[in-house]
Amino acid sequence: MSSQPQRALSPVDTSVVNLVQVDFEGRFLVVASGAEFPCRVAEMSTAEMRFVCDFRPKLSEKVIVYLTELGRFEGYIEQHDSTGFSISMTLTKAKHKKLAEQLVWFGNRDLLEMSESRRHKRIVPLLQWTMVRLELGKEVLAKINDVSAESVKIEVNSNLLKGKLIVGSHIFVGSKAAEVTRLFDGGFVAKFDEPFEEGEVTEFIRL
């Protein structure tokens, strides 16, 4: 794994050739045998994933990977190393662009979250329950962990969202349109399409 310090990625960097340090939980299926294994992806670009995993498939074997935060990918075992293995991927133009945008966000996540925390106070509303509407129209009851002018952190039954939500998904939190920017065990964070005006976010806010 690369030990070089991680650089901030430009928002217009749509190639993401360099590996970005991430920490994604997931599973992979070895196509030839049908065997499935849990895994963790530690580094990723639009062409490669590096896995931390005890099991190492044979070189050149095809695998199908499902990452909770990003969805489904296919690739071929390219290399083994001391902690796991890496795969190479060939993406469609549309999926390449979307993954590049997601990796840019993950590469800059700490800086972005620190910046937002300085600009916007986070509030725990008195009325924490709301409805979240997913892209295909499914609605689930959810709890607002906290909210700022730009984003909201939601707690929800993970089983209700399994396979239905990835980073970049467009949803509604109550009547407020938003885009999912991060998934965590038990919920997600979403950024509002239209931020609230200064002073609108108080403990009495309802979503």
Image (tube, helix red, strand yellow):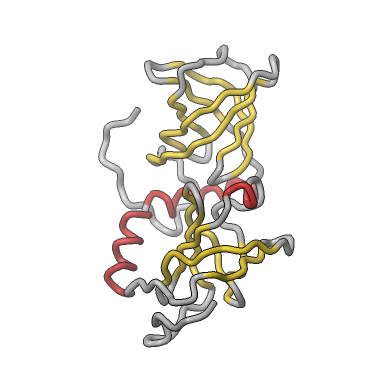
Residue at 50% from the left image edge and 28% from the top image edge: 39
Residue at 58% from the left image edge and 52% from the top image edge: 157
| Image quarter in which the N terminus is found | top left
Name the residue at the front extreme.
Answer: 126
Give the left or right position of residue 151, taking residue 76 as reference: left
| Image quarter in which the C terminus is found | bottom right
Q: Nearer the viewer, residue 126 or 76?
A: 126
In the depicted structure, whether residue 113 falls above or below residue 76: below
Q: Give coordinates of residue 113: x percent, y percent.
A: 34, 61
In the depicted structure, whether residue 31 falls above or below residue 132: above
Give the left or right position of residue 110, taking residue 22 as reference: left
Q: Nearer the viewer, residue 76 or 93?
A: 76
Q: Quadrant of residue 145?
A: bottom left
Q: Quadrant of residue 133?
A: bottom right
Q: Nearer the viewer, residue 136 or 87?
A: 136
Q: Give coordinates of residue 69: x percent, y percent.
A: 53, 46
Residue at 70% from the left image edge and 16% from the top image edge: 32
In the depicted structure, whether residue 47 falls above or below residue 15: above
